[in-house]
Image: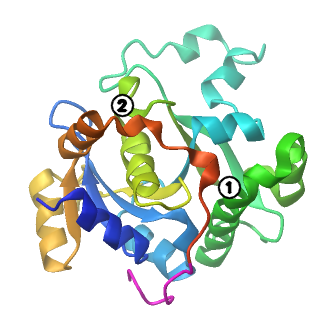
Amino acid sequence: MPMLTEIAEELRAGRPVLVYDFDGRERETDIVFASQFITPEKVRFMRKYGGGLICTTVTEEMASAIGLPYLEDVLRTSSLVPDILLDASDLKYDRNSSFSLTVNHRNTFTGIPDVDRALTISEFARFLGELEEFGERATVEFARRFRSPGHVILLIAREGYFGRRRGHTELSTYLVESAGLIPSATIVEMLSDTGRSMTKEEAMAFASQNSLKFIEGKAIVEEWADGQGNGHGGLRHTAPRPPSLSEGE
């Protein structure tokens, strides 16, 4: 199992890593990229070799600064949505959803092709990297660049990371922020030809065949607990120079 320093090196180089959550949770593996390095080629990689929902994360601190809500909270305030539809007491792996709004960058066409989603995701990461400059104008500036609904699903990582939730949203965002990058990851679940999610063993075999790093959630949470790693300051990150477009394919 690779050390987190190795995972950070991969993410900083613009390459994907595979993150398995926990045996007692979803038991799924996600492909994870740092959002600031997303290209059309990398969206296609996720679409072909992941197959689940391609989503982009943001810290709760940054979401609050922008005015991004949890989708669940939006639905609960709508008189058009019956309360019974929002009853998630039978959710088998968690108590809270991380889903927020869906967005497109205003320079996209339909928003769904690889080039459109890559533009939305990379510009979203760029916006987060500049967020501190906007101050109280953040929401207006965000709306000037993006529209909703769209084709990129935003996920909000709970503040404090694993003290409140231990999903792929938190695991991937923590890894990217720990690597010193803009704290936004783009992730997708890996699905199997069996019609189910890839097993841990299938995902590990894929990682080995493609020279990718694979890490389990328990290793990430242990490092966080040992280093009090929930103290990262998401608003203070700037983007390093991105790698070539072919990296991570």
**Label 2 SS:** helix
What residue is pinned by disc 2? 162
Rendering coords of residue 71 (x, y %): 64, 30
Real-space Cα separation, disc 2 to disc 1, in angstroms: 22 Å
Looking at the image, which is closer to me, 91 or 127? 127
Residue 68 appears in the figure? no
Write down the region rendered in magenta: 241-249
Q: What residue type is labelled 2?
A: Phe
Image position of 149 (left or right of 162) = right
Residue at 59% x, 69% y: name it: 239
Rendering coords of residue 104 (x, y %): 74, 59
In this view, 103 is above or below 18: above
Name the mark on residue 128: 1
Residue at 37% x, 75% y: name it: 15
User: Neighbour class for label 2 at 10 Å: few (<14), some, many (≥20)?
Assistant: some
Magenta run includes residue 106: no
